[in-house]
Amino acid sequence: IKHIGVFTSGGDSPGMNAALYAITKFAEVNDIKVSGFRKGYEGLIDGDLVPLKSHELQKITQKGGTILKTARSKRFLELEGRKKALQTLKANNIDALIAIGGDGTFKGLLAFSEICDIPFIGIPGTIDNDISGTDYTLGFDSAVNTAIENIDKIKDTAESHNRVFIVEVMGRDSGYIAIHSGLVVGADAVLIPESGKDFIYLLSKIKDYESEDAFLVVVSEGDEIGAELVASKVKEINPSLDLRITKLGHVQRGGNPSALDRMLGIRLGVAAVKTILQGKKNEMVGILNNQLHLTSFKEVVKQHQVNDELMELLELFGK
Ligand code: F6P
């Protein structure tokens, strides 16, 4: 292995730059050149790549976002796009590829592996924490910290006015950010997509609510859940409530990565290069029980579940 390509794909997440630094540093130690493709799969298709040097990346490990930029590429979903990406790899003598992203990114690599047989290794990078094969994804911890910092502030004003506040957090189909942030801020109810009966519970709780205190609901985004839907159901039950909605939105994706995410980026970045040097391919590197762990892309893209212990805590504190 002489030349590794790397890219970030899907939604950016804090810690991606730390992972890029670690990949490049460990590759250099092993006399391997690293090139970064810009804007995810788009850069692969268009041959948009830049050489990466660890001494430059070292300066930005503390920064959120991704210096390589990122995208959700529609063109790569087509065989035509993947063929162009293959030509780019060949033209630049890339002999292994590391992708940092979420399950959409790994689905892309699986499809690509049908026409390209160089080693592909994945690093889980998404704030949603919805990837199997790792306890935590890059960016999740930072996103939860951003969420709780903001919800704590909302609580101050909610308590001053005795208001009902419905705070919506990100996560797409995953309730991880809602569970972690909702439980630690002491929310009165936490609603996640994975658990259907939350609504009924919340509604019965709020029916007799007397406005003598604030009432804080933390809810995941989503078509079947989400702040507006919850607010409309709550209003139906108790129209007199003084209710406000706050959607935290993309603020959760930004900011400097937490110590945990920087460390995760460093561990997974080095592990990705090591895995390539061990001759493996089509595997995602993750951390399970504080140990490095490899999971095949085929396993990774299967549905991710919230574990039973967290569901129990949700039952206890979030309802
Ligand atoms: O997957 C990360 C994520 O932030 C989700 O939590 C959210 O649903 C989605 O990306 C938002 O995507 P976009 O930035 O394209 O609006």
Image (spheres, helix red, strand yellow):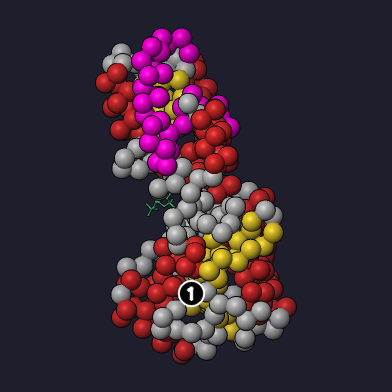
In the image, residue 301 above or below residue 217 = below
The location of residue 68, given as percent across then percent down, is: 50, 67
Foreground residue among 140 and 192: 192
What amino acid type is highlighted by mark number 1? Phe
Look at the image and tell me whether residue 39 can be seen. Answer: no
For residue 80, side relative to residue 187 (left or right): left
Q: Going 71% across and 81% down the picture, which residue do you hit?
A: 30
Horizontal relation, residue 286 to residue 160: left or right = right
Residue drawn at x 58%, y 39% is: 309
In the picture shown, does residue 220 fall above or below 78?
above
Q: How many numbered markers are drawn?
A: 1
> Magenta stretch?
184-213
Q: Which residue is mark 1?
A: 37
The N terminus appears in which quarter of the rendering? bottom right
| Magenta highlight on residue 196 | yes
Q: Is mark 1 within 8 Å of ligand 1?
A: no
Q: Position of residue 39 (x, y in %)?
A: 43, 68
Q: Quadrant of residue 241?
A: top left
- Give me the residue at 64% from left, 56% from top: 288
Q: Quadrant of residue 228?
A: top left
The image position of residue 25, as x and y in percent, is: 68, 72
